[in-house]
Image (tube, rainbow, N blue to C red):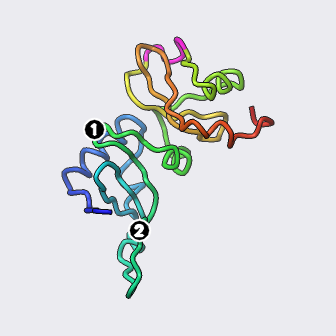
């Protein structure tokens, strides 16, 4: 897998987006290194990036934080679940009924009135679940198809 570190310009664009959309500051991620593969942005602790092992190739260091090569890239469910507690904006808290509909692939009509087009974090209470997309006041699911099977029915 061909990887390269994000340039300082690419990092500036990514962190500007993260701050404007989600309220995340660059300082919150200062201990991480960011790499780009053909389509994705991976993040890992800087000390892991520096590790090299004789006769041992590391295929995947860290987690896939964003996917896609467009701007803005889509935050992955893993990134949102790990760091969603740091978000100060760009999220919505769903009721039990709304989450059930969302997991079934239904758009939440009118739930995002006044929000700008783009990705957002879906929460249920204090739990960060995954990614949605705001379009024309509606929230569309960006969840992987199998995520609904991983959520306890007791939680819904």
Q: Is residue 20 magenta?
A: no
Which of the 4 quarters of the picture holds residue 35?
Answer: bottom left
Question: Residue 69 in the image: x percent, y percent?
Answer: 28, 43
Crowding at mark 1 (Cα within 10 Å: few <14, some 14-19, many 20+): few
Q: Is residue 92 above or below residue 41?
A: above
Decide: is 113 above or below 32: above
Cα distance between the residues tagged 1 and 2: 24 Å
What is the number of the mark on residue 59?
Answer: 2
> Quadrant location of the C terminus?
top right
Report the residue at 42% width, 31% height from top.
119
- Vertical placement of 54 versus 40: above or below? below
Label 2: few (<14), some (14–19) or many (≥20) C-alpha neighbours in 10 Å = few
Secondary structure character of the magenta stretch overall: loop
Queried whether the magenta region covers residue 111, the answer comes back as: yes
Instruction: Give the image location of residue 143, x and y in percent.
Output: 53, 35
Magenta region, residue range = 109-114
**Could you tell which of marks 1 and 2 lies nearer the N-terminus?**
2
Which SS class for mark 2? loop
């Amino acid at each position: 897998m061909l990887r390269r570190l994000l340039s300082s310009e690419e990092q500036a664009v990514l962190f500007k987006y993260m701050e404007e959309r989600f309220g995340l500051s660059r300082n919150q991620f200062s201990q991480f290194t960011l790499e780009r593969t053909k389509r994705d942005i991976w993040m890992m602790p800087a000390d892991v990036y520096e590790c090299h092992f004789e006769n041992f190739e590391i295929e995947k260091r860290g987690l896939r934080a964003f996917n896609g090569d467009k701007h803005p890239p889509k935050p992955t469910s893993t990134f949102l679940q790990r760091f969603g507690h740091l978000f100060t904006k760009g999220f919505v808290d769903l009721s039990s009924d709304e989450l059930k509909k969302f997991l079934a692939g239904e758009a939440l009509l009118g739930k995002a009135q006044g929000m700008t087009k783009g990705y957002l974090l879906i929460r249920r209470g204090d739990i960060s679940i995954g990614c949605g997309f705001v379009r024309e006041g509606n929230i569309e699911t960006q969840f992987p198809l199998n995520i609904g099977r991983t959520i306890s029915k007791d939680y819904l």
